[in-house]
């Protein structure tokens, strides 16, 4: 298909079908950056309330940079991929401290920022500063692959590079921002991964995949990455109004977030049968031990977590002894208000909500 016609049809389609999203009505690089970081690996419907919360609490980069990290993590809670929140905060600080709160204005300079990859840099450069650089996400891969018959493997680094080069060749110089928005929106709403709306598509008569009956087979993707299964046995320990929690360290998922004492098991069948606290509980006068029969399944990109929670209700008079154990283990005892205020993985939130 002729690239000029493609871009013209796309822009006409966009003018009619575009969703009214808050980050589309601004050229402020801060809001554009914020929305792009929030929307990575996240659907618009899920990301939108987070964008609104962040924009309301931190209306500019200074406000975000000066916020305590716990507050940022807490606001991010439930969105997953927590390294994004840490990078978001670190990047805001860098812009505030070293760049007089001003975002760089070119794609190349934007790439220097922490947590800003080619996709986000292209989005900010084109949406805020009008630079003709293509934004290439999964939606764009799909549309380009189908319309132009590109057969490079879209989830390989080589394939990604080829798609980026192609997209940068066809992006119009006059209105790159609208073109980028339009192609992403077209991929999200019309040329969807499953059951695309080919019958009402304004591009269908020149679409390679549609004409060749290859809509289902494009884009080509290499086989899925193996997902690792992990088995978490949690001890939910309560003593009076206090709950035992621990902050997660680096080198694993959920860095810096708070969960409960945890034993990682080798076998799923061992859930509910083993826990580091099971052996220790005899040291305390225990009011109740509740074995939650439910195994929570929590799916991350490369991991599938099966988690079980056993609740130990310890007599209040045992608090000093329990506190010593908690201290020795590097855990913390928090009251209900503190428990609510710390940032927790979504799995823990799900469990606590089920508890209510
Ligand atoms: S015809 Fe179908 S596959 Fe081709 S661009 Fe339109 S929606 Fe996508």
Image (tube, rainbow, N blue to C red):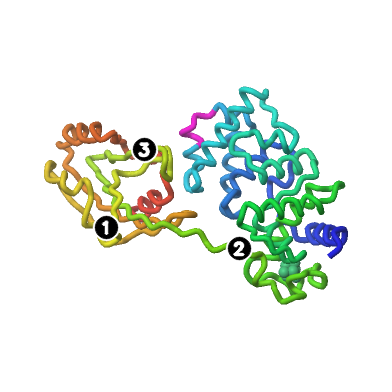
Nearer to us in this view, 175 or 158: 158
Q: Residues within 10 Å of mark 2 (few under 14, many from 20)?
A: some
- With respect to residue 338, does 3 lie above or below? below
Report the mark closest to the observer, 1 or 2.
2
- Measured as percent of width and height from the top left, residue 176 is found at 80, 48
- Measured as percent of width and height from the top left, residue 61 is found at 63, 31
The alpha-carbon separation of the residues under discs 3 and 2 comes to: 38 Å
- With respect to residue 305, does 51 lie above or below? above
Chain-order first, disc 3 or disc 2: 2
The alpha-carbon separation of the residues under discs 1 and 2 comes to: 36 Å
Query: Is residue 7 a member of the stretch shown in magenta?
Result: no
Numbered label attached to residue 144: none
Region rendered in magenta: 67-72
Q: Is mark 1 within 8 Å of ligand 1?
A: no
Please report contact status of discs 1 and 2: CB closer than 8 Å, yes or no. no
Dominant secondary-structure state across the stretch colored magenta: helix
Numbered label attached to residue 271: 1
Q: SS at mark 3?
A: strand
Residue denoted by label 3: 247
Query: Is residue 69 a member of the stretch shown in magenta?
Result: yes
Numbered label attached to residue 221: 2
Chain-order first, disc 3 or disc 1: 3
- Measured as percent of width and height from the top left, residue 299 is found at 44, 57
């Amino acid at each position: 298909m002729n690239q000029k016609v493609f871009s013209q049809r796309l822009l006409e389609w966009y003018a009619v079908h575009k969703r009214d999203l808050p980050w589309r009505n601004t050229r402020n690089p801060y809001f554009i950056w914020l929305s792009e970081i929030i929307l990575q690996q996240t659907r618009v419907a899920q990301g939108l309330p987070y964008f609104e919360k962040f924009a309301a609490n931190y209306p500019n980069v200074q406000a975000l940079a000066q916020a305590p990290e716990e507050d940022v993590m807490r606001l991010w809670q439930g969105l997953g991929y927590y390294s994004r929140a840490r990078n978001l905060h670190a990047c805001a600080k860098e812009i505030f401290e070293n760049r007089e709160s001003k975002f760089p204005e070119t794609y190349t300079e934007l790439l220097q920022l922490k947590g800003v990859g080619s996709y986000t840099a292209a989005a900010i450069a084109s949406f805020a500063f009008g630079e003709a650089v293509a934004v290439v996400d999964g939606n764009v891969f799909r549309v380009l692959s189908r319309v132009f018959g590109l057969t490079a493997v879209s989830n390989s680094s080589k394939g990604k590079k080829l798609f980026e080069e192609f997209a940068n060749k066809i992006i119009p110089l006059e209105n790159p921002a609208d073109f980028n928005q339009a192609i992403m929106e077209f991929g999200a709403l019309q040329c969807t991964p499953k059951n695309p709306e080919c019958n009402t598509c304004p591009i269908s008569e020149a679409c390679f995949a549609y004409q060749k009956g290859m809509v289902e087979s494009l884009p080509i993707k290499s086989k899925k990455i193996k997902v690792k299964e992990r088995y978490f046995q949690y001890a939910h320990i309560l003593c009076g109004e206090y709950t035992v929690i621990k902050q997660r360290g680096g080198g694993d998922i959920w860095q810096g977030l708070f969960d409960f004492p945890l034993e990682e098991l080798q076998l799923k069948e061992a859930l509910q049968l083993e826990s580091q606290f099971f052996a220790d509980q005899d040291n305390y006068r225990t009011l109740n031990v509740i074995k939650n029969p439910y195994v929570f399944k929590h799916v991350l990109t490369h991991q599938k977590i099966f988690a079980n929670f056993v609740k130990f209700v310890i007599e209040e008079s045992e608090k000093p002894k329990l506190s010593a154990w908690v201290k020795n283990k590097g855990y913390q005892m928090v009251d209900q208000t503190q428990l609510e205020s710390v940032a927790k993985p979504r799995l823990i939130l799900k469990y606590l909500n089920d508890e209510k």
